[in-house]
Amino acid sequence: MPELPEVETTRRGIEPHIIHSHVIDVCIRQPKLRWPITENLQQILSGLEIQRVDRRAKYLLLITGPGQLIVHLGMSGSLRIIQAGQSPAKHDHVDIGFDNGCVLRYTDPRRFGSIMWNQGAIDQHRLFCNLGPEPLSDEFDGELLFQRSRLKKQPVKTFIMDGHVVVGVGNIYANEALFLAGIDPQRAAGRISRQRYLLLARIIKEVLARAIECGGTTLKDFVGGDGKPGYFQQSLQVYGRAGKQCRNCSAELQEVRIGQRSTVFCRRCQR
DNA sequence: ATAATCACCTGCTCGC
DNA sequence: TGCGAGCAGGTGATTA
């Protein structure tokens, strides 16, 4: 469910409800996520004020004085604000209660997500210290893609989805950006010109920014932290459209697997 | 170092 | 209607 736009939508949805609130309760019904949740999370969080909610890559960061709660939604996770007292459903694994009556509820059927506590600077964390730049920041541009791709033989799609190069480009938006840039996703990353990478970087920024404006892409039953659905789905050009007509040239869209991930593209428009 | 594959888990869709 | 196979938004760990 969550790619970067969905995570950012979630961040914007939950922050207003919990900012400057204090944690009064933590309820862990299922600690077995991708990594086991710290068992003493209750003791750690109790009484702490949420100063703000940040995002780095697809991680949400609940910032407190002593440290941050790092939340990743994996493939199927979501965070919702509910009112205290609502009974939990099957995959509602964690509740964090606040002194204003709000409860932050973590739901994740597949449990690929994670909830971790970190003290100190976030960029020292082992999962964060080698991450590439944010795609919407000035640090990320076509020149970076061009430089970092030299000599690389891996498909360009794999390359732009590598979080060590740039974060936040997941399967949906990698497919979409490569279509819009007219680049064959199977092409070796090191054999693409600077000119084309400049275009690709601009398009990645544009696609992600537009998807965020739309509140993300509604897939399955994704809803943001405030319960509103995302409307980017209707803008998708290739993702989920294998076998259908290219919106640009009417050719039949092809599907291949790249790095175990479904890849849809137009043979005529993407070279 | 780089690149490809595996692993984690549940739910849903598809073909027979 | 039932059942196994395959696939799904991510990404760290493991294997060549």
Image (spheres, coloured by chain):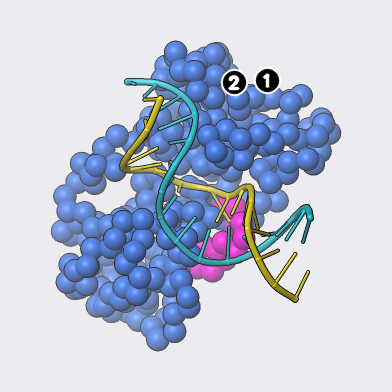
Chain colours: A blue, B cyan, C yellow
Farthest-out residue, right:
A250
For the point 42% across and 16% down, the residue is A147
For the point 78% across and 40% down, the residue is A243
In reply to whether residue A217 is colored magenta, the answer given is yes
In reply to whether residue A40 is colored magenta, the answer given is no
> Residue A213, can we see it?
no
Q: Chain of mark 1?
A: A
Q: Residues within 10 Å of mark 2 (few under 14, many from 20)?
A: some
Decide which of A220, A180 is in the foreground and name it: A220
Residue A23 marker: none
Q: Secondary structure at mark 1?
A: loop
Distance from disc 1 to disc 2, alpha carbons, whole Å, reads 8 Å
Q: Earlier in the sequence, mark 1 or mark 2?
A: 2
Q: Position of residue A236 (x, y in %)?
A: 68, 45
Q: Secondary structure at mark 2?
A: loop
For the point 68% across and 20% down, the residue is A271
Residue A187 marker: 2
Is there CB contact under 8 Å for labels 1 and 2? yes
Identify the residue under disc 1.
A271
- Which portion, as a residue range, is magenta? A216-230
Q: Residues within 10 Å of mark 1 (few under 14, many from 20)?
A: some
Tell me the amino acid under the disc marked 1: Arg
The answer to whether A54 appears left or right of A253 in the picture is left
